[in-house]
Image (tube, rainbow, N blue to C red):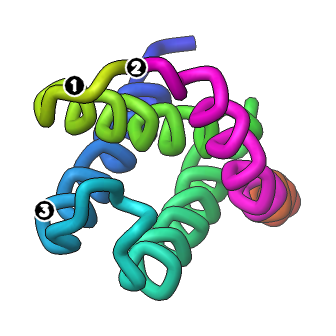
Amino acid sequence: MNGLPAIVSFTCGLTLWVIATLVGGRTEVWDNPAFWTVAYPASLGLSCVLGFAFPFRTWLWPLLVFAALELVITTTGLARGGGAGLLPFGLAVIAVLALPGIAASAIAGWVARRR
């Protein structure tokens, strides 16, 4: 297996979360109401597209999309003088947020394999 699906997943996720952070103007990306109405639904749609485009290991693509979110949150927190003390909690929250994306990716991958 080549690493293209992983690179695409992480890069698309990173792009989505950086844009959401820059547009939001809040300290934390999820403090912005647009996170819940635009960015998070877009991440679920992205998970669906990735699952369809790469219909194997479909659980991995959303995890990489949401790993990019953790990278953005940690990087912006450190840049603003904060620490990474809540990193374990953040990882747990992001793991829960990734579950619908994993389900969407798995369904899309199943549909792609049936075609």
Q: Is residue 101 above or below residue 98?
A: below
- How many residues crowd around disc 3 within 10 Å: few (fewer than 14), some, or many (20 or more)? few
Q: Earlier in the sequence, mark 2 or mark 3?
A: 3
Instruction: Give the residue pinned by disc 1.
Output: 78
**Prevailing SS of the magenta stretch:** helix
Who is closer to the viewer here, 80 or 44? 80
**Horizontal side of residue 91 vs 43, given as left or right:** right
The alpha-carbon separation of the residues under discs 1 and 2 comes to 7 Å
Instruction: Give the residue pinned by disc 3.
Output: 22
Q: Quadrant of the N terminus?
A: top right
Amino acid of disc 1: Leu
Who's the residue at 75% across and 38% down the image? Answer: 59
Callouts 1 and 2 close, C-beta under 8 Å: yes
Q: Is residue 60 above or below residue 106?
A: above
Q: Earlier in the sequence, mark 1 or mark 3?
A: 3
Q: Quadrant of the C terminus?
A: bottom right
Residue 6 in picture, x, y percent from top left: 47, 27
**Horizontal side of residue 28 vs 50, given as left or right:** left
Residue 79 in picture, x, y percent from top left: 12, 29
Quadrant position of residue 80: top left
Mark seen at residue 84? 2
**Numbered disc 2: secondary structure:** loop
Q: Which residues are magenta?
A: 84-105
